[in-house]
Amino acid sequence: MNIELVREALHNQPFQPFDLRLADGRSLHVPHPDFVAVSTRRVVVIDPEERGMSVLEPLLIVSIEIPTAAPGIAPPEANGTEPQGE
């Protein structure tokens, strides 16, 4: 995966927790940007619940899953407004 996509997910404002899906099927949850360190060759993810860390090669990250909306918040197209005509 392009390491810039990880950086973009970390710098989203407001920050949204996300999951990194790995080539071996694991998923690493990132609850806050402070739990990830990104360099040019590695991504380090801290797991506060397990009190451990994972050091990853960026090529082993196959996807980033970011929720589209917080629970209880409707997506923009479902907010009850009608599309504007041209």
Image (cartoon, grey):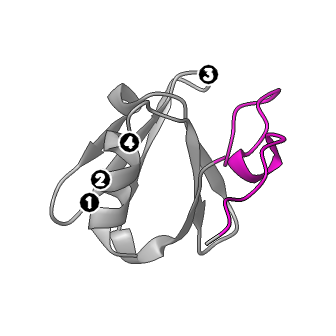
Real-space CA distance between mark 3 and mark 2, rounded to the nearest whole angstrom: 23 Å
**Inter-mark Cα distance, 1 to 4:** 20 Å
Residue at 29%, 53% in the rendered image: 7
Residue on which the image places disc 4: 12
Report the Cα–Cα distance between label 4 and label 2. 9 Å
Q: Quadrant of residue 57?
A: bottom left
* Dot 4 amino acid type: Asn
Q: CA distance from mark 3 to mark 4?
A: 24 Å
What is the quadrant of the N terminus in the image?
A: bottom left
**Local secondary structure at mark 4:** loop
How dense is the environment of label 2, judged by Cα within 10 Å: few (below 14), some, or many (20 and up)? some
Residue 32 in the magenta stretch? The answer is: no
Q: Earlier in the sequence, mark 4 or mark 2?
A: 2
**Residue 62 locus on image (x, y percent):** 54, 74
Would residue 52 be found to the left or right of residue 8 on screen?
Answer: right
Q: Earlier in the sequence, mark 1 or mark 4?
A: 4
Q: Quadrant of residue 59?
A: bottom left
Q: Which residue is mark 2?
A: 7
Labels 1 and 3: the sequence-earlier one: 1
Q: Which residue is mark 3?
A: 49
Number of labels in the image equals: 4
Q: Residue drawn 69% across and 40% down?
A: 69
Secondary structure mostly seen in the magenta stretch? loop
Per the image, the residue denoted by label 1 is 42
Which of discs 1 and 4 lies nearer the camera? The answer is 4
Of circles 1 and 2, which is in front? 2
Rendered image quadrant of residue 74: top right
Secondary structure under the numbered disc 1 in the rendered image? loop
| 51 is higher (above) or lower (below) than 76 | above
